[in-house]
Amino acid sequence: MNINKIRNDFPFFTKNKGYIYFDNACQSLRPQSVMDSMNYYYTNLSACGGRSMHALSAQTTKLFEKVREKVAKFINAKSPHEIIFTRNTTESINLVARSIGLEKGDVVLTTDKEHNSNLVIWQLLEKQIGIKRKIVHSNDDGTFSFENYKEAFDENVKLVSMVFTSNLDGVTIPAKEIVSHAHKKNALVMLDGAQTAPHTKINVSDLDVDFLAFSGHKMLGPTGTGILYGKRKLLEKLNPFLVGGDTVSKTTYSSHEFLDVPERFEAGLQDYAGILGLGAAIDYLLGISIKNIYDHEIKLTTYLQSKIDNISNLHVIGPKDPKLRGGITSFYVDNVDHHKIALTLDSMNKIAVRSGQHCVHSWFDANKIKGSVRVSFYLYNTFEEVDSFINSLKKVINVLL
Amino acid sequence: MFCILAFFILAILGIFSATHRELAKEAFKCVTKRVTFRPCDTGFKDKMQSHIVGTLITKSLPLAKFVNKNFELLSWIFFLTTIASIFWAGNGIYNFYIYGNCNGLVASGFCAFDPTGENNKSSSISSYCVAENIKQNNVSIENVDLSVFPTHNEQAENKIVFIGCYNCDYTRKAYPVVKKLLLENPNISYTFAHYPVKAETLYLLPIGYCAYKSDKEKYWQLNDILFGNSKEKNANPEEVDKILSELGYNLSDIKACTQSQETKKAIMKQRIELEKTGIYGTPLVFVNEVGLVGPKPYRVYNFMLNGIWEIKINKK
């Protein structure tokens, strides 16, 4: 992997010279090709896909559907019909939650490290229709506890909805085993793959997972692009979520006929430019290879870990082994405010990191930790940037402590 | 405390910069919360503190550490100094508006609104017409016998006493301003005293005394002409003789008068009385017994006549 060549593909680095971007778990930067694709749509097409009969519309539809094929291939789905475009992971999860037909007493099983996108909706359904929630607590080091999982599982579990890779500590759960176990117990599985898809090769067919939600903006794609993968036979059983234009084939004053999947779940005019950008992002990732990206991130995380091990009062959240944390390192320093660390790093040396509770308030509050600083790598980050970060961090802690 | 301080400073900076205007708005939100006894949860303080400390770390680690540890204390110190600065700046604006001098009545020192010090410059009586900033001093006409000087409308309640030198630049600058004041306020007792800080106009002292003694009305015309005349002509007795003749004075009588012992005594008496004022530069203009040295803007003299000045004096 030629990092310098990769960095040259990202206009961000020429527009923001010296900036160190370590907030990739929030969203990634974009290569020029993604912007070009979006620009191509607005400049050359600017048409409604799937409705009008003119050539521009046909071309838009063709390119849009081609991206669907790319996404299907990217996660090894059996058919493009199993790919639904949404705005983001949150919307994808909400779509399933609202459409799957959960009833009073049905249990949804989650982990204790869920992003609010896979927590709030279940809390809401708990109040609205009386579903029950069960939480699988992680091991002390943040890794998944299969024992706890089995213990929490009962015959009422209808859906296992879990974060595939935690945005808090980077830990990836053993999805295949979980899916296998759940299916044996007649439960469906949905994975929140927002932090997985950009960094790890996902094979939904091999995993046999029922639903997978992820976002484009964390994997070089535009903001406002999300994906829901679902097994076709399951998607066909889902109740409509958002309805209206482009979800129906025919309507009368008193009735309607829904389109087939996936169109029936894609209400209203789609974000064509965004989806074309997402297609370009996938092309770019595949060009580099997800495995290369993953290996690079692991090296960076391992290097970072070796450097921060020497900093006293600094605690890394999650397993000690950096290989188990992917590209994410969350840490806090005793008696130093995490926001101040992030703000000072930014002011001092233009280093962008995330601080706070990373939308996992529940875990932080339960563990009585105020918040953390999160460093998250991606393909364009370098060892020099890690060195610069470490030097700056040491100074900041010295001053703030 | 930091939010309030930041709001003050950023609001001022925001007049000139859009970036600071946004920050000022943020600081204002924080201030609003604080004054309504709610916690300032906007993160504004942390953001600003981190920005300041982050910038300092790149310059000096110990300094950054000191600022971070004492941020609240430093905020208080800066807040108080800002309040003091605002107060003094306001006082300076008030002084400039009322007295034509930021530093107050008969005060020296730099004034931002009058950077060249034009309103305070006077012709020093210790040497020839050299412009210099006035010194702290008190001038007064409390014990001065004004009856020895030419006076118009003597019985009027409001008084203006103008002490100046015909050939000094600052007196010449002040004269038309005072003249305008007299024209717009006819019921004023006006006294003029020539104080020749230039030797070339010393000879005008007896001429002025005699001209006034001879014809009071023509004397005021003579005065106007001398202030409107070029300095060279004022320095030339023959030119002044011409003026006297044109005004209808009898030159022989004037000459005889100027040579008389009575005139010399009167001039001496005038000089003694002028020294009692504590004069150190011209022009010195008293309005209702309070003196201003240097050529002030019209509004300053006007304020003095219209009572604002009196209020100030009464307080003293």
Image (cartoon, grey):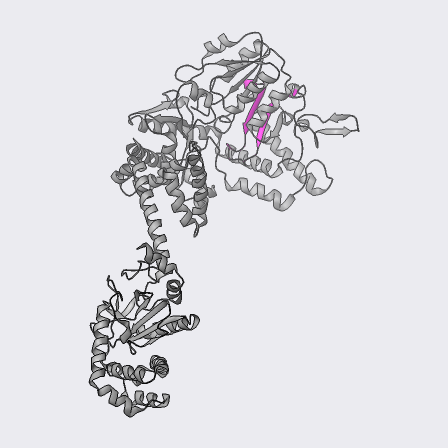
Residue A181, compared with residue A284, is above or below; it is above
User: Looking at the image, which is closer to me, B4 or A169?
Assistant: B4
Residue B148: % across, % down: 27, 76
Quarter residue A368 falls in: top left
If the image is split into quadrants, where does the N terminus of chain B sit? top left
User: Looking at the image, which is closer to me, A49 or B33?
Assistant: B33
Residue B216: % across, % down: 34, 81
Q: Is residue B214 left or right of residue B125?
A: right
Count of numbered labels shown in the rendering: 0
Q: Residue at x 45, y 13 (%)?
A: A145
Q: Residue furthest front?
A: B155
Q: Residue furthest right?
A: A253
Q: Is residue A98 left or right of residue A223?
A: right
Q: Is residue A132 visible?
A: yes
If the image is split into quadrants, where does the C terminus of chain B sit? bottom left
Residue A6: % across, % down: 45, 39
Q: Is residue A380 visible?
A: no
Look at the image and give the residue range highlighted in magenta: A206-232
Q: Is residue A263 left or right of residue B269?
A: right
Q: Residue at x 50, y 24 (%)?
A: A115
Q: Residue at x 73, y 29 (%)?
A: A248
Residue A43: % across, % down: 61, 46
Quarter residue B310 falls in: bottom left
Residue A252, compared with residue B159, is above or below; it is above
Q: Is residue A230 magenta?
A: yes
Q: Is residue A25 magenta?
A: no
